[in-house]
Amino acid sequence: MNHDDNGNRHEVSVMTDEPLELEHCKQQIARLKELVIRLSEIALRNVVRAAEDRKSERA
């Protein structure tokens, strides 16, 4: 907190950090979305492989 010449207290503005933090959060969200997509692709491949393995075991 800052004090002016009259002794009044004023909060220091953090508005300058908010746009940077928002941009950082947006980048993190984009990265997490990419990771979710990659993980989903891996999981789907594993499901397909497992189904193919079961199918070949029955034959």
Image (cartoon, rainbow, N blue to C red):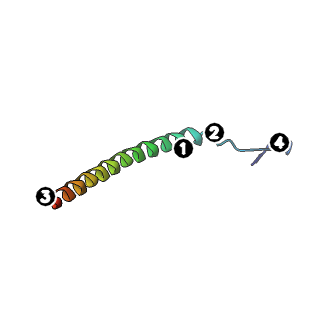
Of discs 1 and 2, which sits in the foreground?
Answer: 1
Residue assigned mark 2: 15
Amino acid type shown at disc 1: Glu
Instruction: Label 1: state its secondary structure.
Output: helix
Give the CA separation, mark 4 to mark 2: 23 Å
* Left or right: 50 as drawn, with respect to 6: left
Of discs 4 and 1, which sits in the foreground?
Answer: 1
Nearer to the camera, 51 or 27: 51
Of discs 2 and 3, which sits in the foreground?
Answer: 3
* Left or right: 40 as drawn, with respect to 48: right
Up-down relation of residue 19 to residue 2 (above or below): above
Amino acid type shown at disc 2: Met
Residue assigned mark 3: 59
Instruction: Label 3: state its secondary structure.
Output: loop
Give the residue drawn at x 19%, y 58%.
53
Residue assigned mark 1: 21
